Amino acid sequence: MTTDSTSGRSAETLFLALKEMRRARTRFALLSAAVGLLVFLILFQQSLLDGLVTQFIGAIRAQDAQVLVLSRDAKGDLEGSRVSLDDLATVGAVDGVSDFGRLNVGGYTISTDTSRADADPKLRLLDASVWGYDLGGLGGPKTLVDGVRPTQPNEILAPTDFEDKGLRLGSTVRIEPGDIELTIVGRTKDLVYGVRPALFMSWETVARAAAARNPDAAEIAPTAFVLQPGPGVSPKTLVERVNAAVPNVQALTRGDAADNAPVVASVSTTFSTIINLLRFVVLLTCGLFFLILTAQKTSTLTVLRAMGAKSSTLVEALLIQVVMVVVAGSVLACMLQALVSIPLKSVGVTLDFASALATTGVVLVLALVGTALGAIRRIVKIDPVAATGLQGASS
Amino acid sequence: MRIALRELRRRPGRFGVATAALAVLALLLLFLGGLLDGLTAGSTGAVRAQERDGFVLSTSARDSFFRSRVTPEVRARVEAVPGVSQVSGFGLTFGSAKIDGTDTDVGVAGYETGSSVLPSPPAPGEAYADERLEQAGVKVGGSVQLGPATPIKIVGFVKDTRYLQNSLLWVNLDTWRSTTRQIRPESTVGDEIVQALTFDVARGSNITNVTAAIDAATGGATSTLSSDDAVNATPGVASQNSVFTLIIVTTLLVAALVVSLFFAFLTLERVPIYGVLKAIGSSSRQLFLGVLVQSMVVSIIAFAIGLAVVAPLAISAPSGLPFALSANRIFITIGGLGSAAILGGLVSLRRVIKIDPAAAIGGGT
Amino acid sequence: MSTRVAKRQAAPKHEFAAELIDVRKVYGSGETETVALDSATLHVRSDEIVALIGPSGSGKTTLLSIAGGLLTPTSGQVVIGGIDITSASPKELTEFRRTMVGFVFQSVNLVPFLTARENLLVVDEIAGRRGDSVKRANALLESLGLSHRADNQPGKLSGGERQRVAIGRALMNEPTLVLFDEPTSALDTKLGEQVMELIHHEMHERGTAAVVITHDTRMTHYADRTVHIVDGRLDANS
């Protein structure tokens, strides 16, 4: 009995909500379009930001160690970090470390596709980020898209999406200056650092490259140590332990190391500001729309209340409309995002459903807050007795 | 129309929220526009600062200075092309220098002809530095050392001369060659060879014809670009432009929608009084003009608010942020917002026209 | 023909402010045909106040609308102030209403955010008429006893005062004919009488004709003549 009347009421509420939307078709369409474009702007810029950030620190996220240890004076910047090999044993001995290794990150000029007979090496010069680690140990990429992991000093891993720059599976690469010839045996996604392709290879190879560039240099120092926490130990815990145990170093989780890269921080802040402003516009627009909508039908609502409709029913009808508007807008936004991701794939724009869902959720909450502040308050304030009073002769 | 203005003055509150939303959008438009202009300026300063009509690169370079090589033979052929004047050499190499203890991306640009921005090339071993380096701590009389190269003495500063966000040291061609040899041996060029040629178009000729003529004269060995095309061909500029433009246009559409929504509601509310006004002889045109006036005023006020918020950034942007607010950008933005206001107002036109004055009679409440 | 031009050219006043001859207004067709006005003939002299009484649905609103140039008749002839508006275009009707008639509606009349004076000035703004607007508005307000309320917005005026401002607004363009739609229905008896007294006074002082729709028989003695309308038909006394 109760179930019937509840579902009956819900159907009635839905009916009320839809009927009004049909009557005010244009206005609801305009609002959905506005919300849709705003959500699209958010998705688009989120996507840009992710693409941009990946260009800067993709390699950090791609490698398999969950904790990185940099020098303390590097202030979270991998490029400027140099740790001492003397500290390697101490760091490795910290409680909770199940595996550890060393990493050297440096910038080199490479010539690509030298395996092609017709290729002029001078034309295929490329700035690259070179990552040296102990093959078979910690510090290499988590997964591969194609090929195999390197086992020899002349085998390297390269990023996908650089075919047009000469980085193909099986092609040859030379580090300039010097005769260091390397073969790409495996590739993975987003292996980029500092907007340059990141090439992963053996520590020994990197040492040779450094020596070729600067014969007077002594043994190369690691840029960072890489650690893997053991079972039951979270990366955060390991970070705290290392920082407590070893002076001169700063341990960071992989995520923090990525987020703290200097350019990333400022770019993220800029985009976040823009995205927050867009969210604010959603709140204002939805709030204003539903407030005016409610205000303009106050007399109708008052009559309904006088006839016995509960405030909660009226509010429910309103909420249904809000949800429908946001969902319609989000669908529009996803379609637009999918559309622009075709020509703009190179800049990193894609339709990421997880991101779209999260954004829709946030936007829905904002729209509801805006509605609550305006329209819902007004509905709740309606006094049914006003339905009987004569409207004062207006003007 | 005066009614419309009076309503704005007497009932500002009802326009408040819409103005606020538009102000945020105006702020976004100015901010994004300023970012785009700042990024573009920082990437193309070196090209624009030379104030030449065109650039000649080798075809195989595919519009990149770094990959381009122009020999004296090619240069001679270019100089012989009618309509070409003041041919000069140009070369660009990127490196890194320690400024105030920090590793900074610094490049060296070799040139032959000055402009209103660039003085004539300095003596060997000397350079005019981009003013960003002055902000980073470099002083006149001091020197900058790129990698292991011979330090270069700074004799002055120049504005807006960066390339791809890198600050440049402007040197004569010999200094450029010797520095390149030391920091990028694989990119070394022989004496007399440059990466590109810059030129002006003689009076009476036009740039399109001249660029074609040059490439014909060199038998297709060169790819000549006008200065504007060279700016647009700068890596990243075209794609930045399209991305930002997409965002800006979408934001303007949102502004138009916000205006349309708000005035759709307002117009609905005014149907009774519009009916009365039509009954006493007002035309749809007069009423609709009132709507447009209000939407324009609201947009202008919103723009002013947005500008006020962005202005501090324009004056002193944090050093990492490439931001430049030009008068051009301000005009484009206000034009865009004005158009959005008109477009948004148009949505109400149909309803205003449809209002039947006869409904004013007997219309209760 | 431009009514403004016609008005200036017409030196003597016409004998009749309004002549509706055999006017019919029919809505719909066939099965759903409604006859709102059926062969209505009404002559209103140039200084006459006519009270138009009828139950709701009697067609009195339709009659008023046609006389005021708000509706076009299905058949018949409508001549106001000597100008035939029977087949005038909507644009011509708009101009006609600007210059020849005034309206006082039942409830919504005034622009809520304009002062009493500004509500009068609006009439001249709509007509694009410049010059002595403020003077004429002030004079009207004074004769209506509203000088001290001239700068108040309708929200600050009493019901009776608002109605008086509406009357002033209707007279602002010096019309040939003023049409009143139930001017006292929202007012109590005393106020209603005051307003009717005012209408009587102002119309006669200016020699302006008026048609007043009312359902209140107590008010009809303020009019010079009463005409009854039932089911779209006027009684013989027109």
Image: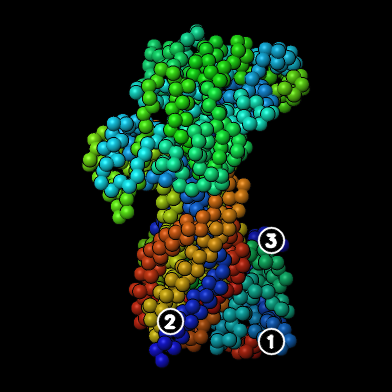
Chain of the residue that carries numbered disc 1 in the rendered image = C
The residue pinned by badge 3 equals: C2
Chain of the residue that carries numbered disc 3 in the rendered image = C
Location of residue B198 with respect to B249 vertically, above or below = above
**In percent of the image, x 47 and y 11: which residue is there?**
B126
Q: Nearer the viewer, residue A156 or B45?
A: A156
Q: Is residue A236 left or right of residue B49?
A: left
The residue pinned by badge 2 equals: A304
**In percent of the image, x 45 and y 75: which residue is there?**
A317
Amino acid type of the residue that numbered disc 3 sits on in the rendered structure = Ser
User: Residue C46 appears at what percent x and percent y?
Assistant: 61, 73
Q: SS class of the residue under badge 3?
A: loop
Q: Residues within 10 Å of mark 3 (few under 14, many from 20)?
A: few
Q: Residues within 10 Å of mark 2 (few under 14, many from 20)?
A: some
Q: Mark 1 and mark 2, same subunit?
A: no
Q: Is residue A316 left or right of residue C29?
A: left
Location of residue B300 with respect to B205 vertically, above or below = below
Amino acid type of the residue that numbered disc 2 sits on in the rendered structure = Leu
Q: Are marks 3 and 2 in contact (CB under 8 Å)?
A: no
Q: Mark 1 and mark 3, same subunit?
A: yes
Color theme of the render: rainbow
